[in-house]
Amino acid sequence: MGKKNRKSTSDKVRRDKKSTEKKINPFEIRINRQKHNILGRKSKHDKGFPGISRSKANKKRKETLLKEYLNRKKSNLFVDKRLGENDPSMSVEDKMMQRFAFEKQKSHEKSAAYNLNEEEDLTHYGQSIADIEKFDDKEDSDHDDDGKLNAEYVESEHFGGLLTKKKPDSQGNKPKTREEIFDEIIAKSKKEKYDRKQEKEEVTDMRDKLDDDWKAVSQLLAKAKRKQENTEVIKSDDYDIAVRSLLYDMKAKATDRLKTPEELAKVEKERLEKLEEDRQRRMKGIVEEDEQRKRASHISADSLSDGYDLSSSKKSAAMISYKDGKLVDPSSRRQGESEIEDDEDMEEEENDENASEVDNEDDEDEEDETDDDMEDLEEEDESEDEETKEKKVEEIFKKRKELAKKRKEVIEKAKKELPFTFKAPDSYDEFEEMVEGHTTPDIDTIIQRIRATNHPSLGEGNKQKLEQLFGHLLVHFCEVASEEQLDFILIDILTKHLYELAQMSPGNAGRCVHSLIKNRQEQFKTTTESKGRVPYPPSDVLFCFKLISVIFPTSDFKHPVVTPTLLFMGHILSRCSVRDCHDVVVGLFMCNLFLQYVSLSKRFIPEVINYLNGILFLAKKKDPTKICCNVVPPFKPVGKFTDLLFIDKKASGKRSLEPFRLSDVLSCDQPDTLDTNTFKVSAVALCLELIQSFAVLYEHLESYREIFQTIKESCCSQDIPWDLYPIEIKELRDQVINQLSKQDGQLRRPLTSVEKTIPMLKMFEPKIDERYDPTRKYNDSDNKEMNEKKKLMNKHKKEMKSAIREVRKDAQFLSRQKLKEQMERDAERKQKVKEIYHMLSSQEGEFNEMQRKKNK
């Protein structure tokens, strides 16, 4: 039975292998033919079987890419760096031979690093060591035979011979002892030192003598030089003058550093507060004399008050006075003085509501002064005459009156002055109360002081106060601009402050001005709907347009304030009809504003060109039988106001060129008074100047000729009586015509596509090439460089395709590997879950069995 089972299983395995083995289709076999057969060379790839190359590629990926993938998160890898270990083409013998050769070479390099070649000649300082003398001469040597130094040499050279006992010489003189030798050396050194000192003293004496001799000689030379200068005048040349002038040049000195805007604002605020305190003192009647007297009468805390009379009192002291040559009773005099003071108090109460407090202070000061003066009189010598006393009393009363008068003048002058510090207004009514009744310079001063005392750097919340101030100034600007008599000086002052505040807080300024323009535009629409026609806006709107061009940049492509303003202005020019000379002036003013707005951005404004063409139309002579079609709304070809600027020959009056002022036109109550020949000439002249400016501005436009074609025709036509205009207008018209005609021959052509050449029809005759070979590729061009470039491009394209294909196959291989790992993890998890379920079910069965047994 066992043998049968084994046979059956082996048969099953064989059948499974046969079923799994894929039969190769002979038609899928690829035969690789060689171009040239070479004798003795075996071809390994004569036939290409399908799947073989794929299996090899997969095998190579498993050896390389799979290993990298499996080791991607491992850092403790063991890399075998032995020679030839990673090269499968090398055999074991080749690996061992290569390793043995490398080891021998490495050891040979280490051992031979310090070996000296016998053939090389060693040198020392450029000389050969073999040719150097061996120093075998014993006569010149200081060494003994055994190589040690001689004792005589050491004693004589190193110790001066003091270590050995010297023998007496031939004459019998004893050698000197050591002490004698040292004494001689000391004496010799002292002698040399003394000689040097003597030599130095001699040199010093000689130098002093030469200095004295030179002083005597220099005095004689100076006298001789003075005589020569007196006799001969030496002329200084330019160089001497320049050198002497350098002595008087101012040298640069270090200066204090420049203060920041915050520091300057702080200093300005302190200055204004100090001036305001001074003004408050002057309003109370405190003058400089009072302050000086208070400083002089000041008693320090350390004073002992020696000699002070406690019995006498200032208020009770008897004061001597005379009236009409008779002695006045002190009590009656005191009563008279009080009456005078009461009269003065009543006068001051009539002049000012707050004079009572000031008068009380003045009375006290005057009493103090009189008491002091009377005390001075009492202290004087009693032997003086009565007349001199009376004169002094009169002088005292005179001084009192002068001082009181001076105080009144100071108080009145201080009340008329503007306060130096102002609180930021919370509402426009409060701001209007501040500036009401003041002149234009005073309004400028008030605004400056409000800004100085509420600078943003001086405290929190000041920035919000100045933002509110910008809104109040904007409303006040509109009110001033809407008055009948325009105050251009005040408008300029408000414009300056609005500009500076807008630079400080541009966001708030943009919101305020945008809301203002929006409200004006809504008012313009409601007025148009109520009246049935479109009138021109009032003067405050025109000045707001001018203010916006000053505060905000007009060259931006899109601006939250300037862009709506431009649309509003264009709407006014295109909708408002011209009915009188006032409308003509307002329209020309807006055209001038448009020129300022678009001078940098060069934005095209068709409403301006249409309006200028309409102004020239109003100056033409119309034929009642014909209808002119060269104008568009708001101008009408026929009607009551079409001859508004036409100059008739029969009309009387001057025809001179006089520029009109905008203030005169806006403040004029009767527009008919402007209907004069002078006004018409000036309006046409201003229109021509604007046409010339816009023509220069729009030179870059392609449709330049079409834009100014109607204007050019109007300037050249004889319907306008140019003969009746001054010479300046004729010259200006010629300049405009020349400017408009300059671009006729220089217009840019519009962009067009390149003209394509019509291809020739294909003929049916075949193209025969005798050298044609179907196995090779041909290039149409005979250029070698182009052919090489095409070959490289084809090769690059081929390699790129193969690289992309390999990358895709690598990605597919990795994805299969990931899928395989995921499936293995899932299978392992399922197996574990099954085992857990099996274990739980067995435990449950055992538990149930135990329960049954217990129940039984």
Image (tube, rainbow, N blue to C red):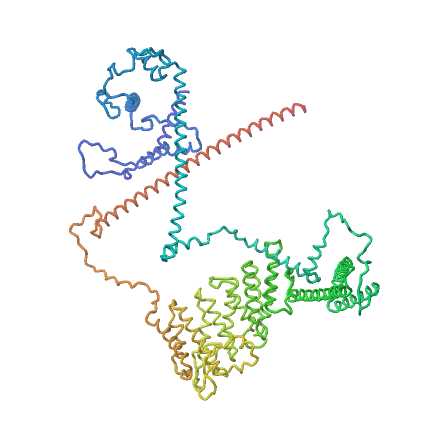
Which of the image's four quarters has the C terminus? top right
678, above or below 176, in the image: below
| Residue 855 rendering spot, x and y as whole percentages | 68, 24
Q: How many numbered marks, from 0 up?
A: 0
Residue 766 placement: quadrant: bottom left
| Front position in the image: 138 or 830 | 138
The residue positioned farthest toward the bottom in the image shown: 650
Mark yes or no: residue 92 visible.
Answer: no
Which of the image's four quarters has the N terminus? top left
The residue positioned farthest toward the left in the image shown: 770
| Front position in the image: 421 or 722 | 421
| Front position in the image: 278 or 86 | 278
User: Relative to residue 646, is residue 461 drawn left or right?
Assistant: right
| Residue 240 rendering spot, x and y as whole percentages | 37, 55
745, above or below 640, in the image: above
Residue at image point 26% right, 23% down: 124
| Front position in the image: 589 or 250 | 250
User: Relative to residue 94, is residue 164 drawn left or right?
Assistant: right
11, above or below 788, in the image: above
